[in-house]
């Protein structure tokens, strides 16, 4: 079955995405129409309407997007990607109105570092990464290269950023580690001529550029936390400021305003409004995560900033107060859980935190932070009074779902981190699995938590635990190639399922007479609960392991997701794929059908959470 091409299978409808790659420099752009945000997530570009948050997706890159820019007229979007060493990294120019590829430009090796459109959309200039080191000018209308050149002198460092002048289609600036050049485009001879800017004794790594409206000066933000002002006509350094109070952790984003003031974003998460050239901040706001992009809406009466903690903020210029408009995980998401019997909310966990989301609006309702720890698994207790979670420091932590307060923690629950967790439906027991392979049963009561039994059978980490509805039995999947069905009354092994694979996921069928498993061998196995015998095996994927699986509430279908980045809906009895969802750009780590069977939610290693319309509801 899986040998069929995905074109013949109906596609799932992607309803919404929670995700933003905040580490891409100047990744967050307000489109010149003033109505849309354009930003990257994995290998996708997302266009989101500001009014109703409706999203559209541009798919075309084969690997993570490393830079996004929008032309001044708004007609084009350009994006560059990273790729593996020795391969070419594509640049795609998108036609904004048609939402399709206008041209695909392939020259740079390994990475596209930076891109800039000329003021009248005639040219696009691109900068290759450190393994490429070239700067290329492209004709936007024809989609072909005009000319190229090494970006910096052999004695200088790598170029990091490029910017066109505001009024001249033939002048642009490149800057980076100890290199600062102004280039003139000589179109008749198809050449670009660089002029080195004289900075005297100053050695700086320039991370961002901004040109004044009249093209008289340009400003270079540096990793040292100061800003160089250079005269664009004479190419001479005018000033280096501020001398005393430098911007902490470097200047990471710059924007000039029509008033002549400057917005400065720095690596410690501060957005400053600076007047005049000494760049002394008159207003400051502290954000979460280092600022990576500042983008103006209209004339700058409103502006948006993106931070590397994957947060999007909106500011009004007059009151200069931040308003958080978008949040998401900035690390891999490990697990997802719905409260019993409701589809309105769900919880996800990642490094540093657990977050609770509203399903329909994708708004973050609650964030529970445990700094520097990774949460491997999360589950709502059936009575809805607590969220139980498994952490890599060997603790089981239990929080309230309303306020996120810690109710209690079980210390040293497992010696090599807690990797899986589940609870019985009467909320009196927690079953946990650890990195060392033990399965432990805990009794939970008012004010006490007691270890009842430790079951030692698995030789490697436990990846998934599911409990039978009547609480007499549970099944655990492990990366040692076994799934064990345990008796939770006598605490002994009932049956063991063996396979040559690292098991990643296991599910009870709704009627609980069969289990289905999957893992690194890409096969989906059906097994009899009664005696652990195999019933049948399906080829689950053509490439990469299957990491997540869930059965629909009525038991007629199940969903899978894994390293092939595809969401697949299967008929349980037919064993055939009925629908495929294409949209993830990282490996899918877990997947769930919501309890009311309206949507499927999948999470991935690039921090994205995707909601799909359930096709059979």
Image (cartoon, rainbow, N blue to C red):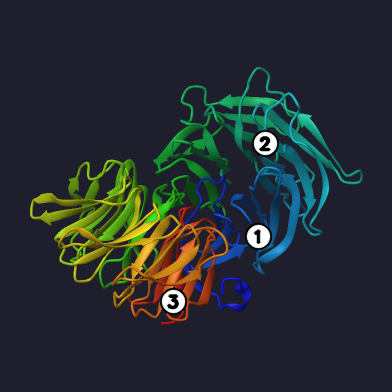
Viewer-side label of 3, 2: 3
Judge the density around disc 3: few (<14), some (14-19), many (≥20) Cα neighbours within 10 Å.
many
| SS at badge 2 | loop
Residue nearest the viewer, comparing 523 with 412 = 523
Judge the density around disc 2: few (<14), some (14-19), many (≥20) Cα neighbours within 10 Å.
some
Judge the density around disc 1: few (<14), some (14-19), many (≥20) Cα neighbours within 10 Å.
some
Numbered circle sitting on residue 31: none
Viewer-side label of 3, 1: 3
Numbered circle sitting on residue 74: 1
Mark closer to the chain start, 3 or 1: 1
| SS at badge 1 | loop
Mark closer to the chain start, 1 or 2: 1
Q: Give coordinates of residue 155: x percent, y percent.
A: 73, 23
Placement of 127 over or under 200, stated as above or below: below
Q: Give coordinates of residue 309: x percent, y percent.
A: 44, 46
- Labels 3 and 2 touching (C-beta < 8 A): no
From the viewer's perspective, tell me whether residue 143 is left or right of residue 280.
Answer: right
| Mark-to-mark CA distance, 3 and 2 | 44 Å
Does residue 165 appear in this view? no
From the viewer's perspective, tell me whether residue 363 is left or right of residue 247.
Answer: left
Does residue 462 appear in this view? yes
| Mark-to-mark CA distance, 3 and 1 | 35 Å
Q: For residue 157, which quarter of the picture?
A: top right
The residue wearing badge 3 is 614
| Mark-to-mark CA distance, 1 and 2 | 30 Å
Q: For residue 445, which quarter of the picture?
A: bottom left
The residue wearing badge 2 is 130
Mark closer to the chain start, 3 or 2: 2
């Amino acid at each position: 079955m899986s040998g069929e091409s995905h074109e013949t299978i109906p596609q799932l409808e992607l309803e919404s995405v929670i995700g933003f790659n905040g580490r891409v420099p100047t990744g967050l752009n307000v489109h010149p129409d003033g109505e849309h945000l354009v930003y990257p997530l994995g290998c996708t570009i997302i266009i989101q309407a500001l009014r109703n948050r409706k999203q559209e997706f541009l798919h075309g890159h084969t690997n993570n997007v490393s830079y996004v820019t929008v032309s001044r007229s708004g007609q084009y979007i350009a994006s560059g990607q990273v790729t593996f060493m020795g391969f070419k990294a594509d640049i795609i120019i998108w036609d904004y109105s048609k939402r399709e590829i206008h041209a695909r430009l392939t020259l740079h090796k390994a990475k596209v570092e930076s891109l800039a459109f000329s003021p009248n959309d005639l040219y696009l200039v691109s900068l290759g990464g450190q393994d490429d080191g070239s700067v290329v000018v492209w004709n936007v209308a024809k989609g072909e290269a005009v000319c190229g050149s090494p970006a910096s002198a052999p004695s200088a460092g790598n170029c990091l950023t490029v910017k066109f002048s505001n009024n001249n289609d033939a002048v642009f600036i490149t800057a980076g580690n100890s290199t600062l050049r102004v280039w003139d485009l000589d179109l008749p001879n198809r050449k670009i001529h660089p002029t080195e800017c004289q900075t005297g004794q100053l050695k700086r790594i320039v991370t961002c550029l901004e040109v004044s409206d009249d093209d008289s000066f340009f400003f270079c933000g540096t990793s040292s936390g100061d800003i160089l002002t250079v005269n664009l006509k004479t190419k001479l350094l005018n000033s280096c400021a501020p001398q005393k109070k430098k911007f902490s952790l470097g200047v990471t984003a710059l924007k000039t305003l029509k008033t002549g003031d400057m917005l400065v974003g720095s690596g410690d998460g501060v957005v400053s409004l600076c007047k005049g050239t000494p760049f002394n901040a008159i207003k400051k706001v502290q954000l979460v995560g280092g600022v990576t992009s500042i983008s103006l809406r209209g004339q700058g009466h409103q502006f948006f900033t993106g931070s590397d903690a994957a947060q999007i903020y909106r500011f009004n210029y007059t009151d200069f107060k931040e308003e958080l408009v978008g949040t998401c995980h900035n690390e891999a998401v490990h697990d997802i859980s719905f409260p019993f019997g409701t589809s309105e909310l769900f919880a996800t966990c990642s490094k540093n935190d657990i977050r609770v989301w509203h399903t329909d609006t994708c708004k973050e309702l609650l964030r529970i932070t445990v700094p520097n720890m990774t949460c491997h698994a999360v589950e709502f207790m059936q009575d809805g009074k607590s969220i139980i979670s498994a952490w890599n420091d060997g603790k089981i932590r239990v929080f309230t779902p309303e306020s996120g307060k810690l109710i209690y923690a079980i210390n040293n629950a497992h010696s090599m981190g807690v990797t899986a967790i589940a609870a019985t439906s009467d909320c009196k027991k927690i079953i946990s699995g650890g990195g060392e392979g033990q399965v432990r049963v805990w009794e939970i009561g008012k004010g006490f938590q007691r270890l009842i039994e430790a079951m030692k059978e698995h030789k490697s980490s436990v990846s998934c635990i599911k409990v039978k509805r009547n609480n007499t039995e549970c099944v655990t999947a492990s990366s040692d190639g076994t799934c064990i069905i345990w008796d939770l009354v006598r605490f002994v092994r009932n049956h063991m399922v063996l396979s040559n694979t690292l098991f990643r996921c296991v599910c009870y069928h709704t009627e609980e007479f069969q289990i289905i498993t999957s893992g690194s061998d890409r096969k989906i196995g059906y097994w009899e609960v009664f005696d652990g015998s195999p019933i049948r095996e399906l080829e689950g994927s053509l490439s990469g392991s299957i990491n997540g699986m869930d059965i629909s509430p009525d038991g007629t279908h199940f969903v899978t997701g894994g390293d092939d980045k595809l969401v697949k809906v299967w008929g349980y009895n037919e064993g055939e794929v009925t629908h495929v969802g294409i949209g993830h750009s990282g490996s899918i780590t877990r997947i769930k059908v919501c309890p009311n069977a309206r949507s499927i939610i999948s999470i991935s290693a690039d921090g994205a959470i995707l909601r799909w319309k359930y096709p059979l509801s």
